[in-house]
Amino acid sequence: MPRTNRAIPTEAAMHIMCRGNNKLPILANNSDKKQYYFLLHKLKSDNSINILHYCLMDNHIHLIVWLGQNSNLPRLMKQINLAYYHYYRKKYGYCGHLWQGRYKSVIIESDAQVLGCGKYIELNPVRAGIVVQPEQFEFSSYRYYALGQQDSLVTPSTAYKNFGSDILINRNIYANFVVSPAIYHLAKD
């Protein structure tokens, strides 16, 4: 039975998730995460994709992407996950399925949802017990938004830019939002 086509919007954000087969730790060390990061960085422009938020965990990845008129999300994900499969296979002598099915995707319908989803994915390392604070985890967009660390993979979201024109205040608002246990909306829908 053929796979059904995905609903892929234009001028919209999507939450993308990929997991290792059988929850295999496919990005278990920094060199593996750096390779996946490199592939994202290399291929995002070729496919007209902006990455708003990301988190590269040991056994899965999360992305929030912005899709424009010329974006090609299926091609991007196929290129990245296939290239990473070849890297992983060569490095570890692995054979078989690396990914648990095709990537999952959810359309994000508002700026508030972009922020909420960004918070969710950037707190993954804290919830998993890998770090105590989100800024301790190197492979997520949190440091870009909350600390101002340069990260050429990230295109700042409209929701983040709508906080105001003072970047230091924006960082503080975002950092407080992410670590706050409360769930609330910061941006207008």
Image (cartoon, helix red, strand yellow):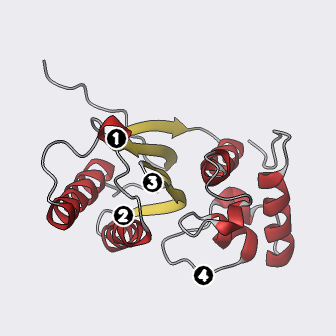
Q: What residue type is labelled 2?
A: Ser
| Spatial separation of the CA atoms under disc 3 and disc 4 | 23 Å
**Marker disc for residue 51:** none
Comes first in the chain, label 4 or label 2: 2
Cβ–Cβ under 8 Å for marks 4 and 1? no
Frontmost of labels 4 and 2 is 4
Drawn side of residue 78 relative to residue 149, left or right: left
Instruction: Point out the tag, 1 or 2, that comes first from the N-terminus.
Output: 2
Does 23 appear above or below 45? above
Q: Residue 150 carries which label?
A: 4
Kindly identify which numbered label has been placed on residue 48: 2
Residue in view at x 79 percent, y 76 percent: 167
As helix, strand or loop, the secondary structure at mark 4 comes to loop
Label 2: few (<14), some (14–19) or many (≥20) C-alpha neighbours in 10 Å:
some
Residue assigned mark 3: 58
User: For mark 4, does the 10 Å Cα neighbourhood hold few (<14), some (14 to 19), or many (20 or more) residues?
Assistant: few
Determine which residue is flagged by label 1: 103
- Calculate the distance from the C-alpha at mark 4 to the C-alpha at mark 1: 28 Å
Q: Residue at x 29, y 39 (%)?
A: 21
**Measured from the top left, where is residue 135 in percent x and y?**
70, 67
Q: In what quadrant of the picture does the C terminus appear?
A: top right
Q: Distance between the residues labelled 1 and 2?
A: 18 Å
Placement of 5 over or under 95, stated as above or below: above
